Amino acid sequence: MKLPAKLSGAAIACGAALALAGAPASAQDKEPIRIGVMSSLSGAFAQMGQDGVDGVRMAFDEVNNEIAGRPVELFVEDSAMNPSTAVEKTRALVNRDGAQLVLGPLSGAAGLAVKNGADEFPNATIIVAGSAAEDITMRGIAPNVFRTSYTGAQPTFPLGNYAYQQGYRKVAIVAEDYAFPYAQVGGFMKTFCALGGTVTEKFWVPIGTSDYSSIVAQIPQDIDALFVALGGTDAVNFIKQMDQFGLLDQIDILGGTVTVDGTQLASIGPLMEGVVSGSIMSGQLENEAFKELDRKFQELRGRPPSLFVENYYRAAKWAILALQDIEGRIEDQEAFREELLQTSFQAPGSFVSFDKYHNVVPDVYLNRVQKVDGQWRNVPIRTYSRVSQFWTFDPEEYQAAPPYDRDTPSCPG
Amino acid sequence: MTTTPSFSDKRAGDAAAATDSLHGRLRAISARRVRRDLLLGLLVLVPAALYPLVGSTFHVQLLTSGLITGLVAMSFSLLAGFSGMVSLAQMAFYGIAAYVVAIGGQTYGLPPLATVPLGLLAACLLAALFGLIAVRSSGIYFLIMTLALLQMFFGVAMQWQSVTGGYNGISGITRPELFGLSLRDAVPLYLLTLAVSALAYVGLRWLLQTPFGLSLQGIRDRPERMRALGFRVQLHRWLLMILSGLVAGMAGILGVYYHGVVSPDVAGLTASLLPLLAALVGGVSSLVGGLLGGIFITVLISVVSAQMQQWFNSSHYWTVIGIFFMAVVIYCPNGVFATDSRIRVLLARALGRRGGDDADTAQQRR
C-alpha cells in the first residue's frame, strides 16, 4: 500500500518538474513570486485548514500560477492552531523560503501572535485569511498586516439587530469558552442590548464538550430565543441533545458564524431547519464569482465550498489583483501594500474592500436553514451590505471599550 | 574501560552503596576526563558559536528553537534517566517561567532584571509544589500524576483570563537588550541560548558526579536499599525535581523571547510531547542526548513538514514523524547516539575500523 502511493507521489513530482521545465521561457526567465500559505493542517481544524489551502490553490490556478509574467511559487505550512508554531512557520516561510507575502493563519490566537510580532518581517506582507481576533486590525495596527476574513463580532452585529426586530426581548446564550465566541457573543449583544433586549443567561462551555445535558436542563423557560455560538461537532452534539430533551421545537435558535455550515447540515440538517445565523458567506448566492467557486470546488471535493475555502480564496485573489496592478513588483512592498489597500472586487462571498484599519468591509448575510432541491442549505434571508468591523459605532469609542470576554458586554434585565 | 561513573545503571547503585573507595576511584577517573571533556566541549562550542557567520537567519533560528526544546528534554532526562521519574510536567515549568516574564514585562512593565529571576523562581516554586505531590508516587503513577498537574496548569492558563490572556495568551513580548544587542534578533538570542545550554549542561554534569548526584542514581535503581542506608529518598527526589524545574524554566524564558508569545498551548499535549521525544531520540540516560535530540527533532519536523507539502501536497507530516519514532524505539531504544543503536552499528560497519573507534570513544565518554 505504502510504496505505490510514494511512487505515484514521486511520479507526480517528476511530472511537475518536467512541466515546469517545459514552461514558456518568458515566465522562466523571471524571478518567481514566492508566496507562503499558513493554515491549520493538523488537529481538530485540519479539515477547515485544508479547505483554506484548496481555496488558495484554486485562486492561483485561475491565473495559471503566473502574475505579470512572473511564475508564482507557493509554500504551504501548518500553523496547528498554536501561536508559537504560527510565529515559527512565518519565519520559515519568510526567512527560509523567501516569501514576501504570507496568507494565513487560521486561528485567532495565531493571527494575533503573528500580528504582534510582524515588525520582525519588514519586507513581507501578511494577509490574515482566517483569524477573527479583533485586535489584529484594531487597537493599534501593523503596517504589513491586513485581514481579508472578518472579526468575530462583524457577522453577528446584524444578528442582534435582527433578533430584536423579530420581537425577541429575552435571549440566553450557549457558547464555547474562548476568544472567538466571546467576540461573536459580543457583537450580538452590542446591537441587541443597544436596542433594549436583555441577555438573561450565558453558558460558557469548554471546546469539545460532548455532554450538554446539564446546560440544556438549565436553559430558562421564559426566553424568546437561544443564541448558540458553538462550532464543529460541539454544535451538532448540542442541537441533538436539545432535540432529545424536546426543547428544539419550543425555542427559536440563532446561530454563530461557524455553527451552521455544510458539514453540520449534512449530518443534522432536519434538526437545524429554520435556524438563522450570521455569516459573511452563504450556501446560495447569485453572483458569478460564487457560482464559479461553487462549481469548481464541487468538482474538486464533491461538496459546496465552506467559509474557509472562500476566505482563503478571497485573500489570494485580493493579492493577485493588487500584484497585477503593480506589474508583479512584490519587492516594492510599500507600493504593494498601498495597492492592496485600494483594491476592491467582487469576491464569491460579496463585494469587498478594506477600511483604513486594514480590515475587510464585506456584506453580512443572515442565513436560514432550508431544504433546496433535496439538500439542506444556508439560504440568505437578509443582506446587510458593507458591514464595518465597528458596525455603526464610532471607531474611537469602540476601540476604547474593553475587549470582549465572558462578562463583557453584559445586559441583564 | 569498564567502570562508567554515571550512566550504567546497576553499577552506579552499587557505587553509592559501597561508598568511599569507589568514590575515590570515580574522582580519579573524572579528573582524567575533565581535560578531554573540556577539549571536546570547545570543539563543539566554538564552531557552534561561529555558526551564525555562515548559517542563514532561518537556520540560526531553527537551532535556537532546537536548543530550547533540548533544554527541556535535558530537564526531562535529568529526572527520568538519573532518578527514574518520568515527568510529563516539564512544559508546565517552562510555561510558568514564560508567563511570569510575559506578564511581568507586558502587564506590569517590570524590567527583565526583575522578571527573569522571578520567572526562574516561579518555575522552581511550581516544581517544588508539584514535587510535594508527585514524589510520593513512582513509576507509572508518577507519570500520570505529572500529566494531571500539567493539565491543571493548562486549565489555569486557559481560564484565568484576566491575568494570562486566556486562549490568546500574551503576545508582542518586548525583548531586552544584552550588551547592546536586542534579543529580538536571531543571532544574539542564539548565542545566549547556546551559552545557557552549555552552562546548564556543565552544571548538571558536575552535580551528577557529586555524592548527591550519585545517591540519586542509587535511588533510581534500589530505592529500598538507599532508604535502609539512611538516605532521605523523597527529599532527594524532591530536590532533583526543583532542579529540573529550574532548567525547564530557563528554557521557558528563552522560549518566550524566541517566540514573542506565550499561550496555554505551551502546556498542550503536542508541545509537552516534543521534549519527551527529543529525550527519547537523544537517549534518556544522557544529558547531552537531550540537547542533541532537541536539535534533531526540531530540524526533522521542520524539514518533513515543508517537504511533505512541496513533494506530495500533503499535510500528513506527523505520520512520517510517528513512523520515524517507532523505528527509533524499535532499533535504538537507548537513543540514536547510543552504543547499541542500530544506526551506529550500521554506520560503524560501513565505516570499518574508524566507526568502531568512534563507538569506543563514545562509550568512554558516557
Image (cartoon, helix red, strand yellow):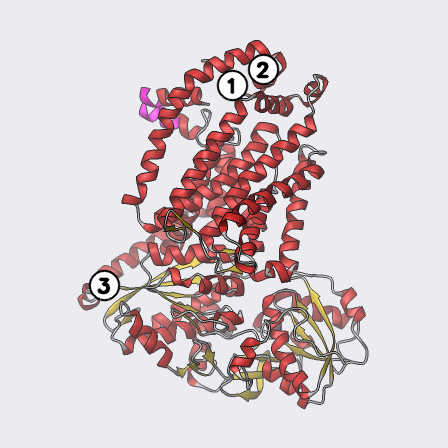
Rendered-image quadrant of the C terminus of chain A: bottom right
Residue A239 image offset from top left, x and y in percent: 70, 71
B352 in magenta:
yes
Kindly report which numbered mark, 1 or 3, lies closer to the viewer in this rendering.
Answer: 1
Residue B281 image offset from top left, x and y in percent: 48, 36
B338 in magenta:
no
Residue shown at 39% from the left, 49% from the top? B61
Secondary structure, mark 3, is: loop
Amino acid type for the residue under numbered disc 2: Ala
Amino acid type for the residue under numbered disc 3: Glu
Q: For mark 3, what is the residue?
A: A31
Secondary structure, mark 1, is: loop
Pick whichever, B243 or B91, lies toward us: B243
Residue B259 image offset from top left, x and y in percent: 46, 53
Q: Which mark is residue B15?
A: 2
Mark 2 to mark 1: distance in Å? 8 Å
Among the 4 quarters of the image, the one containing residue A393? bottom right
Residue A19's place in the image compared with B224, above or below, is below
Q: For mark 1, what is the residue?
A: B5
Pick whichever, A94 or B94, lies toward us: B94
Task: Confirm or deny contact between disc 2 and disc 1 (CB under 8 A).
Answer: yes
Chief secondary structure of the magenta span? Answer: helix
Within-10-Å neighbours for mark 3: few <14, some 14–19, many 20+: few
Chain containing mark 2: B
Amino acid type for the residue under numbered disc 1: Pro
Residue B195's place in the image compared with A263, above or below, is above
Among the 4 quarters of the image, the one containing residue A324? bottom left
Chain containing mark 1: B
Within-10-Å neighbours for mark 1: few <14, some 14–19, many 20+: many
Specify start and end residues of the magenta stretch as a single range.
B346-355
